[in-house]
Amino acid sequence: MSLRYKFIIAFVILTIPVLFLGGISIYILNHLAVPLREDIPKNIQQLADSSTLGKKAFLIQYYDEVLTQSARNYALTGDMKWKTRYEEDAPKLDAVIKDAIAHGDAGDKKIFSSIEAANFTLVNMEEESMTLAGKEDLKGAITILESPEYASQKQIYQVGLTSFATKKGVALDTAVLESAKTLEDITTHTESLITTSMIQISSIVVGIFLFAFLLALYIGNGLITPLITLKNQAKLVAGGMFEGNLPVQSHDELGQLSEAFNTMIAAVKESRSDVDRKVLEQTGEITEKSRQMEDQQKAILNILEDVEKEKKQVTVEKVKYEGLLTSIADGIIATDQEGKIILINQAGTVMLGWNNKEIVGKKLIDRIPVVDQYGQQISENLRPVTIAMTRRKPFVTSVDTSYYYVRKDKTKIPVALTAAPIILNNELIGVIDVFRDVTHEKEVDRMKTEFISLASHQLRTPLSAMKWFGEMLLAGDAGTLNNEQKEMVENIYASNERMVELVNSLLNISRIESGRLVIDPKPTDVVTLVKNVISELKMKFEEKQQTCIVSINENLPLVSLDPKLIRQVYMNLLTNSNKYTDKGGEIHVFLSKNDTDLISQISDNGFGIPKEDQGRVFQKFFRAPNILKLETEGTGLGLYLIKSIIDSSGGKIWFESESGRGTTFWFSIPLSGMTTKKGEVGLEEKIMMGVRGVIKHSDGL
C-alpha cells in the first residue's frame, strides 16, 4: 500500500471522532438558541410596541401645543411667521394621529379616534381664527380661541391622551415584569445546558487526543526507520564507497526510493569511469585553445592601434568644434541635467564678463541672475532654461521680451535667447542656452515708441480742433445745416472720433512701453468701480437689447490698485462684449477671490475668436478675420493695452473662446495690491477740449 493511501486512511480515522464532536456541539448549541430565537424577541417586541405608541402620544401632545400657541400668537400679533409655523406642523399632527390609530389595539384605536375627531374640530376653529386675523380682525380671532366650544374640544383632547397614558403605563409595567421572568428562566436553563455540554465535550476531546497520539506514533515509526537507513548509506557514498545496497523493506514510496538510490549508485560508478576518460580528452582541447588565445591576443593589439588612430581623429574633430563655437558671435552656455555650466564660448564670456575658470562647474542660476526691465529678479521656475528643462521643449524669446542678464560687474544687458533641452535615449542630459545682446534693438524700439508718442501728440491739436468745430457746426453755431450738409459733418465727426480713439490708444501704449506711466494705487472698492463702468455702458446695452448679469462675491476686500488703469481694463472688455455680441445677447460679469488674487470674469455669447487666431489676440493692431467681416471699425490695440496694464500690475490675463459661441476673459490682480510707480503721465482717455483748450494746447506730457 502506498504512503498516500496510508495517510488517507489515517485522516479518515481521525475525521470520524471530530465529526462526532462537531455534531454533538451543534445539537447543544441549537438547544441553547431556542429561547434566544423565540422567547426573548417576543418580549422585546412587546416592550417596543408599548414604547412606540408612547412616543406617538408624546408627539401628538407636542404638535397640539405648537398649533395652539401658533394660532394664538398669530391672532394676537398678526405676524405671518406664526401662520407659516401652523401650516407646517398641522399635517404632521394629523399624520401622527392616523399612524397611532393604525398601530394600536382596539382600545388604542378608540382613544386615538376620539382625539382625531377633536383635532378636526379644533383645526377648523383655529383656521377660522387665523382667517379673521389675516383680515386684521384680531379681536374676533381671539374670541374664537377663547370660546367655551374651543375649550371643550381641548378637554376631549386631553382626556383622550390621559386615558392612553394610564392604559399604556399599566401595559408597559406588565410587559417589563413578564420579560424579566422570561429572561430569568432562560438564564437558569442555559447555565444548566452549558455545564452539561462542557463535561461531555471535554471527555470526547481527551479521548480523541489519546487516539491521535497513538496513531501518529505508529505511523511516524514506520516512516523514520527507512529514512535513517537511507541517510547512513548516503554518508558512505559521499565518502567514496559505492559498494553495498539498501534493503527494500516495503513496496510503498519509501521502498521505491530505496530502489532508485541503488540504481543511482550503479549509474555513478559507471559515469565515474567515463569522467576519467573525458578529462584526458579535454586536456588536449585546452592545449589547443591556449594556442588560439595567443593568436587572439595579437589581433587585439592590432585593434588597439586602430583605436589610437580613431582617438587622434576625434581630437581633430574636437578642435574643429571648439573653433566653430569660438567663431559664433552669439553667447552659448551648455549645462548638465543639474543646471551646472559645463561649457561657455568666448562670445559668452565677453558679454558676461566671466572667464571659463570662474563660471564652469557653477550653477547657471547662481552665477548669472536674470532680471526684468524693472530690475526685479526672475524666479528660478520662470527662467527660460528651467522652463526648457521642465517642458523638454525649446523656449524661444524675442526682442520684445524683457529678459536681462546681470554681468559680473552687476550691469545688465537685454538678451534674446533660445534655451533648448538635450535629450539622449529619452533622458534629459542638459540644456543649451544661446543668447545675444539686443541693446541696439531695444534702443531702436525705444526710438520707435518715442516717435509714435511724438506723432500722436502732434495729431492731438488738429483732431481736437476738428472735434470742437464739428460740434459747433452740428449745434448750428455757424447757421442751420441742410440734411445733406448735416450728414457730411456727422460723417466727418465720426471719422474724427475714431482717429481720436486711435491717437489715445497709441499714446497709452507708448507711455506703457516707455515706462513713463504713473501707477498710483489706493484702497479701491472694485465692486463700486465695476458697477460704475456698467452704468456708463447701460445705454449701449439697451440699444442692442443685451442683458448684463453681474455676480459678485459678498466678501471682497478693498484692494490697493490704480482705479484709472483697472477701470480701463473693465471698460475695454465690456465694450468688446457689447460690440461683438448680437442683439438680445447676454453678458456676464463675475467677481471673486482666492487666497492670493482678485479674479474677474467677463463672458458673452457673441461671435467668438477662431481657434487658429487665438494665439495673436494680444498682439498690436490684430483683429480676427471673422470680426473684420462683421465690424470694420476698430484699432486692434485694446487687448494689447489691457494686457500691458495687467502685466504692469503683477496680474495675469487669459481667455477661452469658440467661434460663434462667445468668449470668456479672466484676469487676476494680487490682493496684496499694485506697486506704486513714479512716472510722468497717466492714461489718456478722451479729448474733451473747448476753443480755449485748442488755442492753449501743447504737446507736453
Image (cartoon, rainbow, N blue to C red):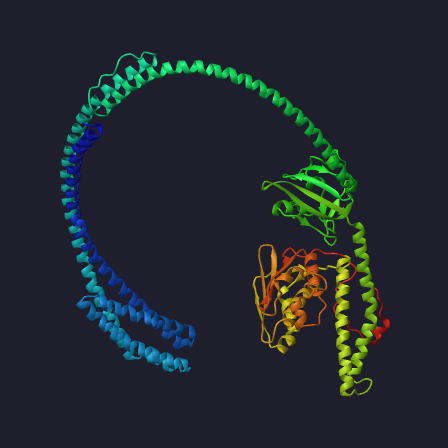
Question: Residue 643 at x, y = what percent?
Answer: 68, 60
Question: Residue 419 at x, y = what percent?
Answer: 68, 46
Is residue 370 left or right of 158 when viewed as pictured? right
Residue 223 vertical position relative to residue 665 in the rendered view, above or below: above
Please tell me which residue lies in front, 23 or 313.
Answer: 313
Question: Residue 119 at x, y = what percent?
Answer: 28, 74
Taking the spot 67% from the left edge, 55% from the top edge, the residue there is 650
Is residue 508 left or right of 41 when viewed as pictured? right
Q: Is residue 686 visible?
A: no
Please tell me which residue lies in front, 582 or 332.
Answer: 332
Q: Which quarter of the figure has residue 64?
A: bottom left
Residue 510 vertical position relative to residue 274 in the rendered view, above or below: below
Please tell me which residue lies in front, 426 or 691.
Answer: 426
Is residue 299 left or right of 505 when viewed as pictured? left
Residue 553 vertical position relative to residue 443 in the rendered view, above or below: below
The residue furthest right is 695
Q: Which quarter of the figure has residue 528?
A: bottom right
Q: Which quarter of the figure has residue 627?
A: bottom right
Count of marks, rendered view: 0
Q: Is residue 262 visible?
A: yes
Residue 405 vertical position relative to residue 471 in the rendered view, above or below: above
Please tell me which residue lies in front, 697 or 252.
Answer: 252
Question: Residue 178 at x, y = what percent?
Answer: 16, 54
Q: Quarter holding the N terminus?
A: top left
Q: Quarter holding the C terminus?
A: bottom right
Is residue 415 left or right of 266 when viewed as pictured? right
